[in-house]
């Protein structure tokens, strides 16, 4: 079942790549595994998904223990409390959800302790939704500059969870907005930001068309 899902998702990614003149190799399919148990994650891994993103530190640690025989590339994609950073810092290659200075500072401090430079993305609240995490577009530059000054953090790009829309076309403007914000940072600071983490089960094809490099797919993969 999971393998069939992977296959279908892969076909749709490929078609979106062809439509938009992109290459499949530019895009990482991340299994958003918060609702999947370790067995489901194992199946998805065996079907070719090599990167997974967890949303809660405690669940992540439990699943990691059950899956430690697999060389999974783990990311953290959920809201992150500063007091949980120490549990995950040595276990994830990318944190997608940096959205405030004190979180960046804590990640920097914990990374320094283990002599690591932690790759992160800054999460932007592109829909201005109060219930969601993410820095506001207006505050993005401040947070980005703050991160630039932290030696054990490296910002690789931006992430967003746009408002849910039945019609994926309605999400397109938010994807465009995130891409433009990334381009603005690249231009203003003269650096390259390789990643745009955007696109979920309901809208990943549109995200591919708008430049996503990491698709975070949960329900379409695991259901
Ligand atoms: C759950 C989750 C996803 C996946 O959502 P689906 O709609 O199930 O694909 C993606 N990103 C984040 C941050 C999530 O928490």
Image (cartoon, grey):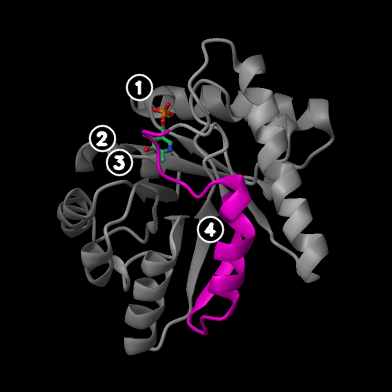
Name the residue tied to disc 1. Answer: 1
Of marks 3 and 1, which one's residue comes earlier in the chain? 1
Q: Secondary structure at mark 4?
A: strand
Dot 2 and dot 1 residues touching (CB under 8 Å): no
Q: Secondary structure at mark 1?
A: loop
Of marks 4 and 3, which one's residue comes earlier in the chain? 3
Label 2, label 4: how far apart the Cα atoms are? 23 Å
Q: Is residue 196 visible?
A: no
Labels 2, 4: front one: 4
Quarter of the image where one finds residue 93: bottom left
Quadrant that contains the N terminus: top left
Which residue is rendered at x = 60% and y = 55% of the image?
140
Q: Secondary structure at mark 3?
A: helix
Q: Which residues are magenta?
A: 130-158
Query: What x and y, as percent, mark residue 218?
Result: 39, 31
12 in relation to 107, above or below: above
Name the residue tied to disc 4. Answer: 121
């Amino acid at each position: 079942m999971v393998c069939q899902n992977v296959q279908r998702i892969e076909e749709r990614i490929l078609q979106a790549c062809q439509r938009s003149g992109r290459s499949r190799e530019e895009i990482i399919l991340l299994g958003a595994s918060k609702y999947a148990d370790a067995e489901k994650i194992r199946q998805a891994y065996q079907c070719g998904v090599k990167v997974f993103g967890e949303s809660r530190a405690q669940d992540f640690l439990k699943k990691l223990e059950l899956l430690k025989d697999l060389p999974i590339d783990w990311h953290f994609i959920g809201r992150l409390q500063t007091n949980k950073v120490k549990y995950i810092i040595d276990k994830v290659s990318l944190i997608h959800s940096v959205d405030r200075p004190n979180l960046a500072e804590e990640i920097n401090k914990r990374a320094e302790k283990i002599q690591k430079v932690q790759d992160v993305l800054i999460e932007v609240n592109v829909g201005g939704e109060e219930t969601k995490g993410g820095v506001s577009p207006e505050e993005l530059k401040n947070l980005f500059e703050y991160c630039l000054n932290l030696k054990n953090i490296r910002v690789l790009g931006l992430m967003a969870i746009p408002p849910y829309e039945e019609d994926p076309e309605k999400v397109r403007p938010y994807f465009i907005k995130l891409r433009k914000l990334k381009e603005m940072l690249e231009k203003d600071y003269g650096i390259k930001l390789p990643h745009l983490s955007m696109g979920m089960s309901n809208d990943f094809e549109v995200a591919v068309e708008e430049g996503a490099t990491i698709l975070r797919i949960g329900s379409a993969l695991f259901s």
